Amino acid sequence: MKRSMFFLVTFMVTLSVNAQNLLPEKGNFGIEIGFKPFSESTTFNLIDNSIKLRYFLTDYDALRLRVGFNWGQTRETTSPSNRNKSGYGNYDLSLGYEHHWGVSDRIDLYAGAQAGCSRFLAFYYDASGNKYETTDNNGHFSGWQFMGGVFTGIDVYLWKGLYCGAEIGLVIEQSMEDQSSYTFAPTAHTYTTAGFYCEPAIRLGWTF
């Protein structure tokens, strides 16, 4: 009898755990990263070198903020007296809105819109030690990029607060390059691009 009662209680607890709603609620805050576990690179890289933050205004509406940062430099030594150095990096910030539809206790669909900007910085030292601050020696320019777009995605909650997901969207970007004072630098341009994106990676986040 005691053994039967034990199994009954265990079964009821298991059902209650499995039946609980794992979806986010009003006032929840979330942090998310996206990474590519199956890329050819042996390094661990975040998508766009950024993290994504969420705040749920209601059970169905959320604000999102993406913050990104990337910086690197290279040195090329062709002789003891010739050491070229260049660097390139970017800083990203975008703000968006999401509307969510919980289709089950674990699956959350969402759609929304976002807009943001990126600042690109490049520099180059030539063999004489002269510094040029709007380009490097690999064809990168300093400049600005402005973006806007719409998106839709899915989050699958594996545990309370823990989810993975995927996202696709349409984005329009306008890039404006700063003209370099470097004599042999290509001419700077302003150009606009548009297209669909799909994050070929794992989105992993925690909502609390």
Image: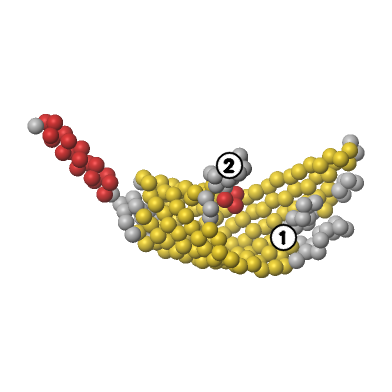
Could one spot residue 58 in this view of the protein? no
As shown in the figure, which amino acid type bears the numbered disc 2?
Phe
Residue 109: mark: none
Answer left or right for 201 relative to 131. Answer: left
Please give left or right for residue 100 compared with residue 39 in the image. Answer: left
**At 43% from the left edge and 47% from the top edge, which residue is drawn?**
206
Give percent across and percent down for residue 137.
80, 51
Query: What colouring does the structure picture have?
Result: secondary structure
Q: CA distance from mark 1 to mark 2?
A: 27 Å
Give the residue at x 72% y 67%.
Answer: 190
From the image, tell me which residue sits under label 2: 44
Nearer to us in this view, 104 or 68: 104
- Furthest residue to the top? 2
Q: Residue at x 69, y 51 (%)?
A: 89
- Indicate which disc, 1 or 2, sits on the residue closer to the N terminus: 2
Q: Residue at x 79, y 42 (%)?
A: 75
Can the viewer see residue 15 in this picture? yes
* Residue located beneath label 1 in the image: 143
Q: Residue type at mark 1? A: Gly
Look at the numbered disc 2 and give the secondary structure of its residue: loop
Question: What secondary structure is marked by label 1?
Answer: strand
- Residue 96 placement (x, y as % from top left): 51, 62
Name above or below for residue 94 compared with residue 1.
Answer: below
Residue 27: image x %, image y %?
Answer: 39, 55
Binning the other alpha carbons within 10 Å of mark 1 as few (below 14), some (14 to 19) or many (20 upward) gives many
